[in-house]
Amino acid sequence: MEHEKLYPGQEALLYSHKIVQLSKALWKTVEKDWQNWIKPFDLNINEHHILWISHALGGASISEIAKYGVMHVSTAFNFSKKLEDRGLLTFSKKETDKRNTYVQLTPEGESLLLETIQAFRPEENGVFRASLPLQELYGKFPELTDISAIVRRLYGDSFMDIFAETSKMITEEADRRPQDPVIDSIKKA
């Protein structure tokens, strides 16, 4: 049977189907990997993400955490509150902006975030392991430029700037601790 040419509506549906299925499958593994990584620190994914964003921004408003963490404002607030209760974040208002609530990592929060980064084990990360054959074949990990371009269109330049900042944080931490094999493995990734 001869294949019919796909029409734009069919192309759109097929493309959307691929994005949905591949994203869902990838997220399932990403979520499992992330949960397993941070479980020893009694953190969930939202809490870890809040710590990371707050660090990258040098403190952040709840709105910024929601935006860059791709979560609802109430989720950002509630999980930030739990982190405050644990002494990992502080809440404040700025003199120039009383309507927004800001969070800042405490030294304990900063320390815990860095501990989680140091505890990352590539060999226990399913997505990392699944990407190794591509790295071996091409000499580098996938750049994900097409996905980055789509995310930039959906969330804007500022979202991608934070993404770049958190990536920079990993590199800088690796540069500060070149003797640490865990950080060294992250740097190579």
Image (cartoon, rainbow, N blue to C red):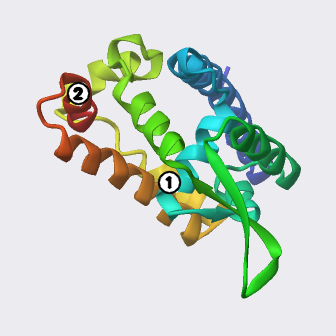
Q: Which quadrant of the structure image shows residue 129?
A: top left
Residue 106 appears at what percent x and percent y? 55, 49
Q: Position of residue 50 (x, y in %)?
A: 63, 46
Return the residue nearer the eye: 52 or 168.
52
Q: Tell which tag, 2 or 1, sits nearer the viewer.
A: 1
* 167 shown above or below 124: below
Q: Quadrant of residue 133?
A: top left
Which kind of residue does numbered mark 2 sit on?
Ser
Displayed quadrant of residue 140: top left
Q: Residue at x 54, y 22 (%)?
A: 38
In this rendered view, identify the residue nearer to me: 27 or 113.
Answer: 113
Task: Identify the residue under disc 1.
Answer: 55
Between 86 and 53, the one lying in front of the other is 86
- The circle on residue 43 is none
Q: In the picture, which quadrant includes the N terminus? A: top right
Which amino acid type is marked by label 1?
His
In the picture of the structure, the residue carrying the numbered disc 2 is 185
Q: Position of residue 109 (x, y in %)?
A: 53, 42
